[in-house]
Amino acid sequence: MKAAILIIIGCWLMAGSLQAQNHVPLKYTNHTEFGGLFGRVKYQFPGSPGDEILENRLNVTLQTFNGVMLSNRLSAGVTAGIDWYKTALLAPISGGIRYDLTKNGGVRLFTTADVGYGFAWFQDDIEGYRTKGGLMLNPGLGLRMGKAGGPAVTFTVSYKRQEAHIDKFPLWDQVERSEDRVYNRLALRLGISF
């Protein structure tokens, strides 16, 4: 958690120094997206040691980036979202940047990077279970279709890594039981930006 906060503060400090160098008046920007998180999960079937099960998973994701334009191509801000995994509902809050790799044109290539922490605020655990969030990383590439400086439709492909910790009700002779999860997903999102 402390590392995520330090990274967010570092992004804001870097953004302030970049803005001071470019002398561009700050302008609000928003990038809102929804889509799917695609992954493959390997786990052990309960009560049968040694038997592993592989499953493909598709989860829903929604996020919004709110920030300021530091130059004509670079923006920095805060990303908030929600990710519905099969057994966890996590709300990541992160610091992020968006950078246009190509200059003006109807279709522009851009990159994204978000680093933060996924919170389990909306998770409703069954009795004896407690879900906690963890570190979240989300770098990606996308296409922005629309006039430069105006509204645009976006399509983004990114890698999302989200950590979670689950405390579970102890079984039989156990004193405590827990599970650390790492969700590694390919995120495909459709969105709008302005």
Image (tube, rainbow, N blue to C red):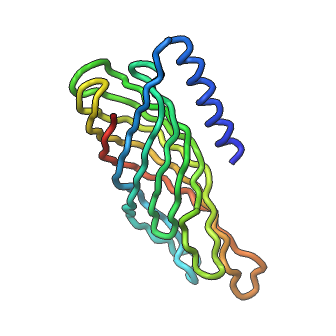
Depth order, front residue of 158/50: 158
Residue at 46 percent across and 58 percent down: it is 83
Q: Tell me where residue 141 sits by quadrant.
A: top left
Q: Seen in the image, is 167 located left or right of residue 114?
A: right
Coordinates of residue 68 in the picture (x, y in percent): 47, 29
Q: Seen in the image, is 39 located left or right of residue 7?
A: left
Q: Tell me where residue 118 sits by quadrant.
A: bottom right
27 lies above or below 48: above
Depth order, front residue of 160/67: 67
Looking at this rendering, what residue extends furthest in the right direction? Answer: 175
Coordinates of residue 46 in the picture (x, y in percent): 56, 80
137 lies above or below 134: above
Coordinates of residue 9 in the picture (x, y in percent): 65, 34
Q: Seen in the image, is 89 located left or right of residue 145?
A: right
Looking at this rendering, what residue extends furthest in the left direction? Answer: 106
143 lies above or below 69: below
Coordinates of residue 26 in the picture (x, y in percent): 47, 23
Residue at 28 percent across and 28 percent down: it is 150
Depth order, front residue of 120/52: 120
Looking at this rendering, what residue extends furthest in the bottom direction? Answer: 172
Q: Seen in the image, is 99 located left or right of residue 16?
A: left
Residue at 44 percent across and 63 percent down: it is 84
